[in-house]
Amino acid sequence: MTSGRVTSAPGGNGAGRWRIRDGSQAELVVGAGLVAVVLVGGAVLRAWPAPDAIDHLVWHVVPSGQHTPLYTGMARLRAPAVAGGVAVVFLLTVGRNRWRALACLVGPLLALVLSELAVKPAVGRTLGGSLSYPSGSTVGAVVVATAAFLAAPRRLRPVVAVVALSYAGLMAVSVVATGSHYPTDALAGLAFGAGIMLLTDGALARAGRWWGPRREPAAPS
């Protein structure tokens, strides 16, 4: 997640001994861990889909059935916000880092497609007759929030992080408060969206190094 830095391995002479330090490995590890948690949770809920202890605990803080203008407005905002957010982040990033811009374009689409067409049918948990795990609204919100954070210049990341987390968190609270999803659906949506975005960004960062221009080691002084 940080900008790449080229160093040489001790005693290295050839270009093959050069390595690039960046955050792609951390992104891949964290992203894979988040997705794995969602899949394990989905396997448990496939066998026991009823609300669990986490759901009841969250309901004490965020009771279901609250149809306030704020919560219902967030539900209406989900599709336009995702589409607009993806377009803005891509356009602001493509001139600086085309591989990250591609990740910000591909990651949200991949996360939504996988959650709606793969994970939800595989888990089979329903609420009100609709598949609910993970929450697609929350997946969309957090994947755009994660993309915005990754694409932001370093000096602006603290501000972007606050705004992005507030948006994704409010979406998660809204789907629980309106009764659209169980709390565990919303939590899984947060983890899945962030995980897929990190995996996509990490993978494309490595692809960019592979396909980008080769760097030759500096001549010895």
Image (tube, rainbow, N blue to C red):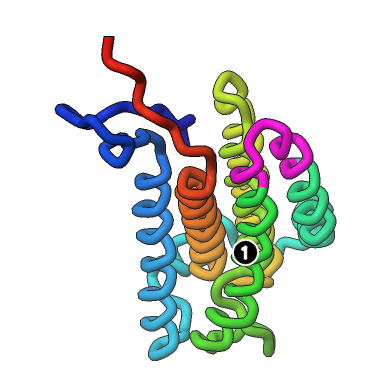
Secondary structure found at label 1: helix
Residue under the image location 73 percent in, 41 percent down = 89
Residue under the image location 39 percent in, 83 percent down = 43
> Across the whole image, how many numbered discs are drawn on residues?
1
- Residue stretch rendered in magenta on the structure: 89-101
Question: Overall secondary structure of the magenta stretch?
Answer: helix
Above/below status of 5 relative to 151: above
Q: Which quadrant of the figure has residue 52?
A: bottom left
Above/below status of 90 relative to 180: above
Q: Residues within 10 Å of mark 1 (few under 14, many from 20)?
A: many
Above/below status of 90 relative to 68: above
Q: Amino acid at mark 1?
A: Val
Residue position for label 1 = 176
Can you see residue 59?
A: no
Q: Is residue 167 left or right of residue 73?
A: left
Q: Residue furthest top?
A: 221
